[in-house]
Amino acid sequence: MALNCRIEKDGSLTVSSGTAYLIRNMYPGIDGHSLHAIRIIKEENKVVWETVHGKVACSLHEEEEESFELEFSLDNYTGPIHTLHFFYQADIRAEGFYQAAEGMGGDTGYYGKNSMLERGTIVSYGLCSLKLPGGHALTIYPVSQKHYETVCEVNARENVKYTDGSGKHSKETELSLSVGARMENTGREQVIFERLRFLLTPSMEEGLEKAAEEIGRNMSARLFMPQAYHWCSWYYCYQNFDRIQLKEYLEGFSQLACSKEIRYFQLDVGYCTSIGDWLEPSERFPEGLEEAFQEIKKAGYIPGIWVGAFMVGNRSRLYGEHPDWVLHDWEGNPIRPWITDNEPKPWGYQDEEYYCLDTSHPEAMAYMKHVFTTLRKWGAGMFKTDFMLWGLQDSSRVKRYNPGKTSIEYYREYLQMIREAIGEDSYWLGCIAPFLPFVGYADGMRIGGDVGSSWDGEFGPQNMMRCLTGNNYTNHRYYQTDPDAVMLRDFQIRLTERETESLALLAAVSGSCIYTSDPLHKIAPARQKLFDFIRPDKRRKPSLPFLSEERPEIVMVHKENNKGLIYILNKSEADFYYAYDIEKLGFTPDWHIFRLKTGGKEELWKNNLVVSIPPHGCLLFILSREKQIIPDYESLWNNLK
């Protein structure tokens, strides 16, 4: 299918394939309104919309048969612009929409027409993809995103059409799409925006993968660090981990086979006196972090540390001495992302409010450079920076020490400083962070909300599961995704044996970060073995054959070296029965199938793989072109070798 774009007589653009339009009435807008042009100039492959404030222009760049690019620009534009819509509420023909999250825990994934109607408006960040009639996909994205946040918004509504005077009517779903860049009233008269690519692919997964690969390449994504396999103090000890427990855990781990390959040993919050006073030791580590890091190194691990890089507590010495180092609103009040003057007090600190560091202030920037340089000097080689979405404050809504840039530009300058301070060889994990600004700086990225000790409740895995599949296209394209800690303990936990195994295998098969916070030296040998079984060996990412469908299960597939893995998780509350066409999973009927764990050769029924899975359960299959399959129960990934 060829993809075409043409400029219409009225100055709008139309995207089509063959004789059918995909997007039409594409016309620029500003801040939620269509652009009012006093004159429209059309040239070959270019259109200019003149307004009383200046010019908005678009140039068409033909690429390959299945793609093209639009390059938008402003010329002598003097009016205020918060968001320039490259096109505003254009009509689209689509069966579904793929939403990309702005950051950790955000809504993401595929929505069919009915779900789109239920939601009304869906906002996607950085890119979006349309499922077209017939199954193809149109993915839309800027090829690099270093200056402005790109926002895609689809609106769905049901329109009632009356056919005649008898009162008979039909319902029709109307969809519109807006795509634009947030300029945040930075007042720039001349701007050439990153090119906006339109890519037509046979499947939505292929379009998202190609988009992420191009964006990652253009933004110098860091894809060379070893796979994360580590221990973190948070999800069992939380802020209570201290020097005594450090000695106990390091000694206990030294006796375990499953801990030999752990790369990073990361300390979380609780080590400093106040949030913001990062280098001042708390009573939990009275000798300071340098000595703790040395003990971790002696045990054979790379020390890791948690830092809330934008966070400043109101009781911190930092704020007491430098109140001008935090962001303020236009009335002069500190920006307060977190108010904690009620129960419970987070992390045991007494702060009633938490403020956001103003990284446009050179002294604040210098202070944080000193913090990260010192932590690196003390021995840290793994950094987890948390609550990073706090720093993405709209420049039109806050008062900065040095104004004039967008939130993305301030943000990436700060990330650049941190990366220089911690060194190229440190592993950097972003958490509660915006995804795209981190590309080129982070090695790993938390994608879903915190998971806890039960399937239900606030810390259940539902958000994580949606985010893990929804952000699969970014894994090993932007950085390594992180679905959160694997729960392994067999005490003080409400996850069943089935749920524990399902979530551990999900994290592993996804090719994401693998780590735990449980006391490995105290858990059952079978759980220790499970942690060793899911240990990563190299960068891998699965395909999701049902990415552009709304389904009750998660299906992930790996295929390499004439071997394969199929993982199926029933995330629903009901028993799941299904017959999969083996070819839709990427294999042919001559492949041999073995069900891991329960053992036994699986036979296809009329080229279908028939499964029955209880709620929260999973199945894991090994596939091979060879008749003889000898499963490896020591290492998951040996089954692909």
Image: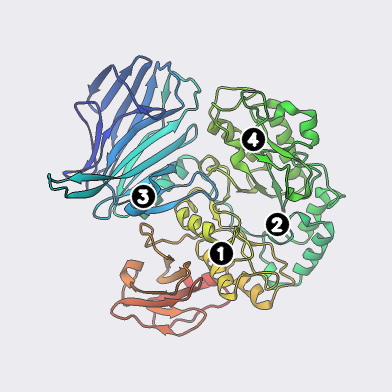
Q: Is residue 575 placed above or below 457 in the rendered structure?
A: below
Left or right of 582, for residue 181: right
**What's the amino acid at mark 4?**
Met
Q: Which residue is mark 2?
A: 234
Residue 273 occupies quadrant: top right
Assign a secondary structure to mark 4. helix
Q: Nearer the viewer, mark 1 or mark 4?
A: 4
Residue depicted at x 54% and y 54%: 481
**What's the amino acid at mark 1?**
Asp
Q: Is residue 287 placed above or below 37 in the rendered structure?
A: below
Indicate which disc residue 417 carries. Answer: 4
Residue nearer the viewer, 412 or 560: 412
Q: Nearer the viewer, mark 3 or mark 1?
A: 3
Residue depicted at x 48% and y 66%: 571
Q: Which residue is mark 1?
A: 537
Residue nearer the viewer, 224 or 270: 270
10 Å neighbourhood of mark 4: few (<14), some, or many (≥20)?
some
Assign a secondary structure to mark 3. helix
